Amino acid sequence: MRHTITVRVNGVEERHEVDANQTLLSFLRDTLNLTGAKQGCNEGECGSCMVLLDGKAVNGCLTLAAELDGHEVATIEGLGQAGALHPLQSAFLKHHAVQCGFCTPGVVMTSLALLQENPKPTELQLKTALAGNLCRCTGYRQILDAIQDAAKTMRAQSKRRTA
Ligand code: FES
Ligand code: FES
C-alpha cells in the first residue's frame, strides 16, 4: 500500500508517495538523497539515525514515512553551511568531538533538540538525553564538552537577539 505525504524537510516542502513500511530514515536517504542521518543498527539502539520531527529527536529507523504527512523534519543538512556553521558544529570541531563521524549527525541533532528545550543542561541531563546515542570512538568526554560549549554560544546569541 502507498501513501502520499506532504512534509517540510529543512524548510522545503516535499510531496512524495511512500510505501506503508518505508521508514523516515529510508525516506531521507533513499528518496530525498539526504544521507547525513546514518543507518547503524536499524532497530532503535544506536541513535545514528536521529533527526528532529516537529522539534523532537526521533529515531529515523523507527518512524514510518507515512506518519510524516503535515509535519516538519530537520536533519543535519539543514543545520549550518560551510563558512556559517551552527554553534554545535563549530564546537564539535573545536573539541575534537568527531573521529569516524558515523555517530555525529545523530548526536548533534539529539543535542540540538535538548538545547532548544533546555538551554542550560546539567551534565546529568546531557548524559540522559544522549543515552540513546552510541559512539564507539570518542569516549564521550569531548562530545559532552563540545555540547556545553555550544550551549554557552547559543545562550549568548539568544541574549544578543533579545537585547
Ligand atoms: S539506525 Fe536507528 S537507532 Fe540505530
Ligand atoms: S565518532 Fe566514531 S562512532 Fe562516534
Image (tube, rainbow, N blue to C red):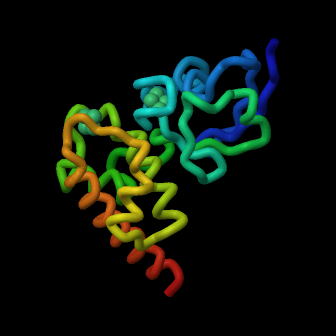
Residue 28 vertical placement versus 76 (above, below):
above
Residue in the foreground of this view, choosing between 52 and 122: 122
Q: Is 148 left, or right, of 49 in this rendering?
A: left
Task: Point out residue 122 in the picture as x, y percentages from the top left corner.
Answer: 36, 70
Above or below for 93 versus 46: below
Residue 111 falls in image quadrant = bottom left
Tag count = 0
Residue 3 falls in which quadrant of the image?
A: top right
Image quadrant where one finds the N terminus:
top right
Q: Which residue lies furthest to the bottom in this view?
A: 163
Q: In this view, does 89 lie above or below 98?
A: below
What is the x, y in percent for residue 48?
41, 34
Residue 74 place in picture, x, y as percent: 57, 44
Q: Residue at x 36, y 57 (%)?
A: 127
Where does residue 55 sit, x and y in percent of width and height?
60, 53
Residue drawn 72% across the image and 35% down it: 68
Q: From the viewer's perspective, is 4 left or right of 90? A: right
44 vs 91: above or below: above
Out of 18 and 90, give the one closest to the viewer. Answer: 18
